[in-house]
Image (tube, rainbow, N blue to C red):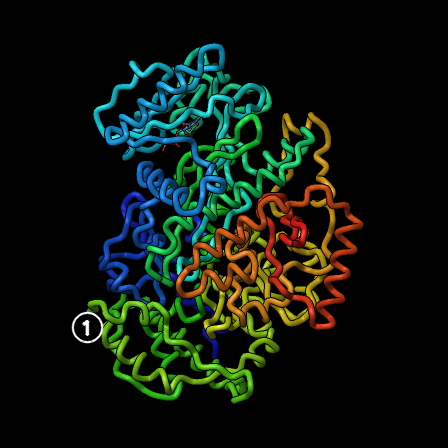
Amino acid sequence: MWDGDRGEDPTPMVFRLHHGAPDVVREVLLERGWEEYNEQEQKAGDWNLYWRASTFRNSDYENLLPWQRLNHHPKTSSITRKDYLARHLKRMRGAHGSALYDFSPTVFILPNDYTRFLAEYTKHRLIKCGGSSVYWICKPVGLSRGRGIFIFEDIKDLVYDSPVIVQRYISSPLLISGYKFDLRIYVCVKSFVPLTIYIHQEGLVRFATEKYDLSSLDNLFAHLTNTSINKFGPFYTSDKESVGQGCKWNMSKFRCFLHSQGINAFPLWQKINNIVTLTLLTIAPSILSSPNCIELFGFDILVDSKFKPWLLEVNYSPALTLDCQVDVTVKKGLIGDLIDLMNYRSNDCLRASGYQRQMHKSQTSELVLPKCSRSQTRKRQSCSQSSQTLAKTPREPTQSSHTQKLPLPEVLCQHQSHKRSHSQLSLYNLLVDRQRHLPSFDLKRMHTERRWVINTNVGRIEKNRTVRGGNPIRDPHSRSPINEPLRPALASWPTANGALLMSEVTRCCDDDRAKMDMQEDSNVSSVTSDSPRPRHSYLRQRHPPVDGALLKAGPCKLPEIHRHKPLRPPWGSTRTQARDGTPPLRVGDFILTFPFNKATLKASRDKLDVKIAIQEVHRLTGQLVTGRTRSEMKQRQLEEEVREERGVGEEDFHSLFWGPKDPPLLRDCYLSS
Ligand code: ADP
């Protein structure tokens, strides 16, 4: 009998937070039914997620077990230090031309580049006579949160006692009611090999709290947009024109603002997409494959008065403190989606015992298990029992043309040569040894048997029934508790390499479920399903409409391209996509931005082909369609559907265009060339 039937708690996933890790991570994981790792009670490997604000040690990567995930890839900090980023971008400009890499302000690393800076400074001083002034901003390379930054016009004000960068100050930023702002864009690199980038739909707009004024360069509350500075400003709590109280908006509010001003923001989104991809391409080839790692970057983008976005810096472990309600909504949603991107599988919650069982469905073994507390042993036994019950069901896989072997956990393959602890070595050797004996499973059958629903939140496998008790179950994509009978299901499906993806929402077969998708599909993220989905359901969003000052400016109507509802869901046939290795196109509010077509998918495999990737970005740039009408788009989609029915379509997968609310299909935003 499945333990849920006996009313026992399922084995929880376990997270481990290093000192200094953000509280919001703990909060989100506890809400999802995870448990916090206890060093005293639990063995070293008995956790599923280790979160650190700082970098991990090499040994952390070397000893990583298949059920474990880390929140950093190795060596990613090489773009998050201001001077390193400057060097990387300079190298890319040299190798690939400055036309595409023109998104970061001119920069000098001092003291090394002092002579070059002096020459540039002098050149501008001479030109200045009659023209407008040139300003510079000086930032210590090793500091963050606005510490040690100052702006100057005259070189005599440049004083520093540690390595700094001096950057051209963007002196005509886009202002909202006189206030300067920048954008914090959350970017997740799910994998560097192959390079897989997601950008979150929500982000932050961070305002200065005093009006922009070039005659007071030393007023940091007017020139810097860091919250860590502005929350101490005298006007932080005042109700500022358009901006409101505090110093933050979410991205939805910004989108609405742009629309209320009649601004076509598509070119802006496209340029930001490019900035993210091109910046990550600078380090991607040098980062080793670490399949169980994920990286969340914070890209700081300043938009100037001509709507050109500038990359200011890339943040490692972007701040996840909750200073205001906007932070709470954006950051909790972000972390929830990030956990979903981590791709936990059903037996990850069982940790070592789950992997043992995977290896030995029909055989016994003497694998050393991590020790655990008595309560955990009990839980594990009950889960193990239930899992065995599952194995005994008549669903034992049969051989067919779709039959595949379960893969050897990638992480173990990656680190074969590294040093391991005794228990890890045992597990590793066992996995390698038994790989050829792994049970087969039937892909086709798994796809059709949609009634087997696995909820990763609580690590529970259920068959068409409502689960009671335990933690309140939250829909991972909606942020809010939902009625259990309407709880969206998470299900597994095999990807091209046979791994079971657990983090994306799929469709339950029953009618109630179908209705729920129609009514509240704000919950829909990346989807896979053999059966047709209700149309348009992915278009509904979970974010509340904007309020306050913006609404006073008039109703926030979306431009034509937003209102147009594609005739079929943008993920297309995910099964086909999974087979050809296409990553999920959307997970929660994370939108896949690289690879974005078959050429970049191919270029990102094995050894990343940076040249092809850049060529593809270049090809897209300039082809952005901003004025396509609704009927044109509809016509084009109909044509595409006919082509697909005839089997001549599907030249590319159905990528989404990050940026607009309800992201449209990428191919609908660009002219075909
Ligand atoms: P930190 O890591 O200390 O936050 P940033 O590079 O993000 O350093 O700079 C802090 C703030 O200074 C930014 O949020 C932005 O408001 C402002 N700023 C930084 N560089 C520039 C620039 N080149 N032009 C205009 N403003 C800038």
Q: Is residue 192 above or below residue 414?
A: above
Instruction: Please state if 518 lies on the left or on the right of 413 as rendered.
Output: right
Res. 116 image quadrant: top left
As drawn, 598 above or below 143: below
Check the picture and name the quadrant holding the C terminus: bottom right
Near-viewer residue (449 or 605)? 605
Q: Position of residue 429 (x, y in %)?
A: 26, 79
Q: Label 1 is placed on what type of residue?
A: His
Query: Is label 1's Cβ within 8 Å of ligand 1?
Result: no
**In the rendered image, is residue 516 in sight?**
no
- Can you identify the residue that label 1 sits on? 422
Picture residue at 51% right of the left edge, 48% below the top: 199
Task: Answer with the quadrant where ligand 1 appears in the image.
Answer: top left
Image side of residue 570 versus residue 212, left or right: right
Label 1 crowd bin: few (<14), some (14–19), many (20+), radius 10 Å? few
Secondary structure, mark 1, is: helix
**Nearer to me, 179 or 519:** 179
Instruction: Judge whether residue 225 can be spotted in this image.
Output: yes
Residue nearest the viewer, comparing 180 with 276: 276
Residue 423 rendering spot, x and y as whole percentages:
22, 73
User: Which quadrant of the structure image shows residue 114?
Assistant: top left
Which image quadrant is residue 87 in? Answer: top left
- Location of residue 175 with respect to 638 vertically, above or below: above
Query: Image point 65% across, 28% down: which residue?
Result: 550
429 or 376: nearer the eye? 429
Q: Position of residue 266 (x, y in %)?
A: 63, 41
Instruction: Please tell me which residue is depicted at 27% across the width and 52% down the height of the picture.
Output: 56
Q: Residue at x 66, y 36 (%)?
A: 264
